[in-house]
Image (cartoon, rainbow, N blue to C red):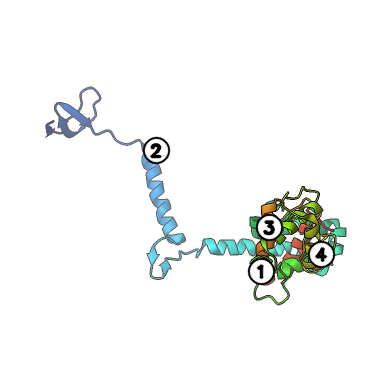
Amino acid sequence: MAEHKHVATDKATGTATTGHDWDGIQELNTPLPRWWLYTFYACIVWAIGYWILYPAWPWFGGATPGILHWSSRGAVATEMAALREARSGMNDKLAAASLQEIERTPELLSFARAEGGAAFAQNCSPCHGAGGQGSRGYPNLNADRWIWGGTLEQIQTTITHGARWAGDPDTHATMMPSFGRDGLLNKAEMTDVAGYVRTLSGNAPDPAADLAKGKQLFADNCSPCHGENGKGNIDVGAPNLTTQVWLYGPTTADILNRIQNGGGGIMPAWHGRLDPTTIKALAVYVHTLGGGQ
């Protein structure tokens, strides 16, 4: 396709051409709409103003700060300061009140549940679930089955110091022995104990289990922590084995795995990460989920 350049006026429209001609087809030099030009110029003015007022140009160690010295970090800090100021009165009341007073006072309870719920969503829900329903290895906080106790004070202690958290001398430190791995029980004995443990919650035992031997082995090895009837002991974090609420699963294989390997879950100590008032609000929130004692 050959291009020729000859500026002329288009007879049909009266518009000047650009002078470009492709095999007899001429390109008209139609001006842009005024509204489009004005918008374009306004955008240029806006951009220049933005460059002057806000951080925009790369510079040594960052960017030009702009006349307003605005930053997203500074904006968030300002909003957080305003929020703390707005909440300061209720936070002071929350800090001064006892856990029981908070639950008895509708205004404080509502505030504590709101603040505790926000803290739970950010810090606890990844393990315990958005509604505190738990999952395998993470306790259900709605079921009134507490490993370390479900009173307000006990929940606050657990949140504050965690469980088996290295570096906190006041953490819940006890854990289940590794009966199989450490050679405390052989395979047949562990099968007998697992079969007996399943009967404590009304489940059928493994046909290979000798329940009489399992009961005696349970009394000799497990009852010091779980109790003679398997009701558990919050002082040492031994779960109640007589319910259908299982932390690691109710099958024979699940129970055998716990007997074989022992151990226990780890929960962070939240003091130092959360302030005491937030921990107090979080304890109240967890206590009111439906399972608090």
The amino acid on which the numbered mark 1 sits, given as a three-letter code, is Gly
- Closer to the eye: label 2 or 4: 4
Q: Which residue is mark 4?
A: 219
Q: State whether residue 109 is above or below residue 274.
A: above
Looking at marks 3 and 4 on the same chain, the residue that comes earlier in the sequence is marked by 4
Q: Which mark is residue 256?
A: 3
Residue carrying label 2: 35
Badge 1 marks a residue whose secondary structure is: loop
Does the residue at mark 1 contact the one at mark 2 (Cβ under 8 Å)?
Answer: no
- 2 or 3: mark nearer the eye: 3
Q: CA distance from mark 2 to mark 3?
A: 78 Å
As measured in the structure, the alpha-carbon distance from the residue carrying label 3 to the one carrying label 4 is: 17 Å
Marks 1/2: CA–CA distance: 86 Å
Question: How far apart are the two marked residues, 4 and 1, measured between alpha carbons?
Answer: 18 Å
Residue that label 1 marks: 183
- Give whichever of 262, 120 is nearer the camera: 262
